[in-house]
């Protein structure tokens, strides 16, 4: 006993043809893929660099030490 597929085979072949015809990287083919694979990592990297820089600055001036 086999279960029916989620989509008809024709729809799958149509989507497959569409994605194979696009000349972009595989991870940038969807409409929101630039947000998840480019913007979020850049935001995380920027925030971490800022926090590291602020920590080094505070350590060099002795700001925030507990007595």
Image (tube, helix red, strand yellow):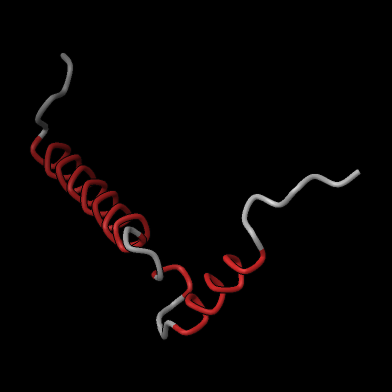
Q: Quadrant of the C terminus?
A: top left
**Hey, which quadrant is residue 14 in on the image?**
bottom right
Is 14 placed left or right of 66 in the picture? Answer: right
Q: Position of residue 32 (x, y in %)?
A: 32, 58
**Hey, which quadrant is residue 29 in on the image?**
bottom left
- Which of 56 and 41 lies nearest the eye of the viewer? 41
- Which of 29 and 53 lies nearest the eye of the viewer? 29
- Which of 13 and 57 lies nearest the eye of the viewer? 13
Q: Quadrant of the N terminus?
A: top right
Eyeballing the image, is 67 above or below 22?
above
Is 62 placed left or right of 1 in the picture? Answer: left
Is 46 placed left or right of 20 in the picture? Answer: left
Is 29 placed left or right of 64 in the picture? Answer: right
Instruction: Name the residue rendered at 62%, 55% in the picture.
Output: 7
Q: Position of residue 19 (x, y in %)?
A: 49, 75
**Hey, which quadrant is residue 17 in on the image?**
bottom right
Eyeballing the image, is 57 above or below 66?
below
Instruction: Name the residue rendered at 75%, 48% in the picture.
Output: 4
Q: Position of residue 3 (x, y in %)?
A: 80, 45
Instruction: Name the residue rendered at 29%, 49% in the picture.
Output: 44
Circle count: 0
Q: Which residue lies most toward the top here?
A: 67
Eyeballing the image, is 23 above or below 16?
below
């Amino acid at each position: 006993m086999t279960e029916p597929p989620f989509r008809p085979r024709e729809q799958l072949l149509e989507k497959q043809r569409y994605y194979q015809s696009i000349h972009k990287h595989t991870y940038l083919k969807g409409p929101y893929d630039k947000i998840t694979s480019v913007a979020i990592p850049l935001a995380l990297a920027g925030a971490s660099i800022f926090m590291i820089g602020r920590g080094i600055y505070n350590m060099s001036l002795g700001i925030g030490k507990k007595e």
